[in-house]
Amino acid sequence: MATVSLYKISKIPKLRDIKVKGLRIKIISNSKDELSFKIIYSEPIKDIISREFKEVASDILKRLKDFADKSIEITIKASIYKKHKVLAIERGKDYVLYRILKKIGRHFGEISPISLDSESLLKLARKYGSEIKFAVFKNIDGLLYETLRGRRLETNDKFKKMLKRNNDSLKVIGFYMKNTWPKFQVTINGDKGTIRYYKNGFERTEISLIVDAVINMHNAFNNYS
């Protein structure tokens, strides 16, 4: 599963001026509307194994003693949507995002996640989705979070009742996108400003479409140009 994290930024820096020890930035493309680039850094193999395989890390490292002290190069793709001043970071697990933001976040001025309310999430699902598969509600019946999974949740009575009981309780929604085969599911977290999806080799067009839609929905809700 891959994740795109979206952030509103107050400053678009000159990437060549970002100098951070142990990290390189390489521009992929630069157009009038979008600046795409790679964030490249190295991580020791022993650190990765210790984090990902905590319980058996010592055994693995013993077997890989000739390689444990070597490092691997990790590449993260990011884009700046110039008109909207939005930074999109395509990454895997949360720790990768936090590491990147810690190292380069200050160069983008004030930075905050793109957030969407329940109504905006539903509008996106209705416009771009063919079937709602997943939903997370907050503060329903005294529960901090409640999750629903299934087919065609938009027709599910419990889904409808939860929306009616608290119309701003929907925080995460997952749906199949229209006109895709194999079926392509995206999950949007309205609180964190993230879009998650499973890579299938054909996702680039769909993800670009949904990223643009989320940004435009956020801007409309917050009266941004």
Image (spheres, rainbow, N blue to C red):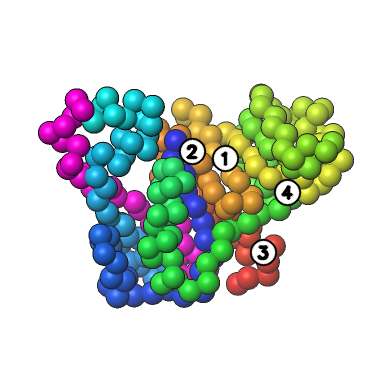
Q: Amino acid at mark 1?
A: Thr
Mark before the other along the chain sequence, 1 or 4: 4
Identify which residue is drawn at 39% across, 57% down: 100
Q: Are marks 1 and 2 in contact (CB under 8 Å)?
A: yes
Q: Which residue is mark 1?
A: 187
How many residues crowd around disc 3 within 10 Å: few (fewer than 14), some, or many (20 or more)?
A: few
Mark before the other along the chain sequence, 2 or 3: 2
Query: Disc 1 and disc 2: Cα gap in Å?
Result: 7 Å
Mark before the other along the chain sequence, 1 or 3: 1
- Mark number displayed over residue 220: 3
Query: Disc 3 and disc 4: Cα gap in Å?
Result: 14 Å
How many residues crowd around disc 2 within 10 Å: few (fewer than 14), some, or many (20 or more)?
A: some
Give the magenta part as a residue range.
Answer: 62-88
Label 1: which secondary element: strand
Q: Which residue is mark 4?
A: 118
Identify which residue is drawn at 46% across, 62% down: 87
Q: Identify which residue, 211 or 181, lies in the foreground.
A: 211
Question: Would you identify the image quadrant in which residue 204 lies?
Answer: top left
- Mark number displayed over residue 197: 2
Residue 96, image x and y in percent?
40, 49
Label 4: which secondary element: helix
Counting labels gives 4
Residue 143, image x and y in percent?
78, 37
Mark before the other along the chain sequence, 4 or 2: 4
Magenta stretch: includes residue 85? yes
Query: Disc 2 and disc 3: Cα gap in Å?
Result: 24 Å
Q: Identify which residue, 66 or 17, lies in the foreground.
A: 66
